[in-house]
Amino acid sequence: MKKVAILGSTGSIGTQALEVVEKHGMQVTALAAHSNVEMLAAQAKKYHPEAVCIFDPAKTEQLETLLMGERIEVLTGMDGLCEIASATSHDILLNSVVGTVGLLPTLKAIEAGTDIALANKETLVAGGSLVMKAAAEKGVNIYPVDSEHSAIFQSLQGNAMNRIRKIILTASGGPFFGKKKADLTQVRAADALKHPNWNMGNKITIDSATLMNKGLEFIEAKWLFDLDPSQIEIVVHRQSVLHSAVEYEDYAVIGQMGVPDMKIPIQYALLYPNRVECPTQPLSLTDYGSLTFEKPDYETFDCLRAAIDAITEGGLRPAIVNGANEEAVGHFLRDEIGFLEIGELVRAAMEHVPGGEVRCYEDVLEADQAARSFVREKLANR
Ligand code: NDP
Ligand code: MG
């Protein structure tokens, strides 16, 4: 059985991954979280990893106390995440932290030659060119966990020699589907946190409400599958049953369907290429009756257009849009800004923060920081 290390084990993806791990008796070599020491310690006691990392240094002592006598190494900070990512005691690293903070550990895992199950989409949005180039050089496989990208990956199986015309990237439309800007002026974090189909972490739930999530996924797809942005079509599909599809040269469209449950793509990434029973429900198409497909509303959802513009321009532009979004979403979650301001701030950063080429990790980090500072300054001066 494969051995797995999980960064972000206390989150929505991380905890579902542990259900999959448990179902198949996989061995866990390392676990990491940001600050949820209680849950991390409980997971460590249950799965007996060699090491755990708590990112927040203020929580290290508490974790050490909770794990007294367990013979588990306790790490902290970015150094700790990178130490886990660089270790070679696991066969696959699941990167399910949230945000750009996931980029460096991804690069470290690639350096170590370890395959990655990648949920952390911000990694590819900010540093896609670096990640894909390094992975190709090292022969490292990146298995997508994001349900749409897993669906595309599954639809590509057995078709290595065939030309792709386009990718159909499906979007649920989020909780504000059908609304116009005038309807969204009073939206608060609590309203945006109610997603119709998926139960996810706060940041991605807000990204789903602004449709930034689909913009980030557009960029993620470009990098994972080496596509031109013109080859990606976003289609709103409210039921989240068709998780995405590939159109080939002959106009045959091959897609993947299933209930909206992340355990299916998580398991496929962890156990690829095996298909074994997953701890989820079967799909009953007749329960759904009909599936619908519509065009996205780019007028209302500014973030989506900003992300597509960013990857079309290329270079550091996606890292800027991503950094600005992460900062803006943080303010929105604290009820400091309105819903529509997220898109306005992202668009402003997209237009005003200087871009340039992506030569190395530091370039990406700098662009990310510049975008965040831009948003903070804009808010301080309003
Ligand atoms: P959550 O907010 O639920 O979980 C995030 C996890 O990452 C938690 O374990 C958190 O720890 C940990 N974490 C955050 N920052 C750090 C850090 N600096 N160092 C170490 N650990 C950290 O997010 P999700 O699980 O929803 O999402 C994770 C990623 O997967 C995101 O990039 C998201 O876009 C992507 N994704 C998620 C999907 C979903 O269904 N949830 C679907 C597709 C993609 P702590 O608990 O201590 O804060
Ligand atoms: Mg997705």
Image (cartoon, rainbow, N blue to C red):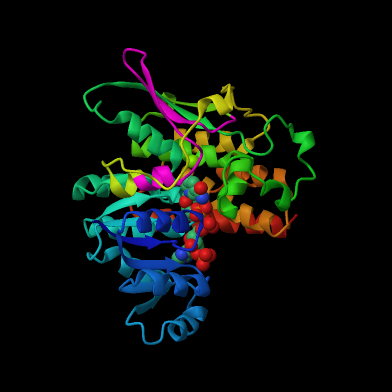
Q: Is residue 238 placed above or below 203 in the rendered structure? A: above
Residue 174 in the magenta stretch? The answer is no
Question: As drawn, which residue projects farthest toward the top?
Answer: 250
Q: Residue 49 occupies which quadrant of the picture?
A: bottom left
Q: Residue at x 26, y 49 (%)?
A: 134
Q: Is residue 209 placed above or below 365 in the rendered structure? A: above
Residue 273 relative to residue 10: left or right? left
Q: Nearer the viewer, residue 272 or 101?
A: 272
Instruction: Tell me where the magenta segment starts and ends, as one range.
Output: 238-267
Residue 160 relative to residue 254: left or right? left
Q: Is residue 336 placed above or below 212 in the rendered structure? A: below
The N terminus, quarter of image: bottom left
The C terminus, quarter of image: bottom right
| Residue 85 image point, x, y percent | 31, 63
| Residue 59 image point, x, y percent | 51, 79
Q: Residue 158 occupies which quadrant of the picture?
A: top left
Q: Residue 380 occupies which quadrant of the picture?
A: bottom right
Residue 239 in the magenta stretch? The answer is yes
Q: Residue at x 44, y 61 (%)?
A: 8
| Residue 303 image point, x, y percent | 60, 39
Q: Nearer the viewer, residue 343 or 188?
A: 188
Does residue 314 appear in this view? Answer: no
Q: Residue at x 38, y 28 (%)?
A: 228
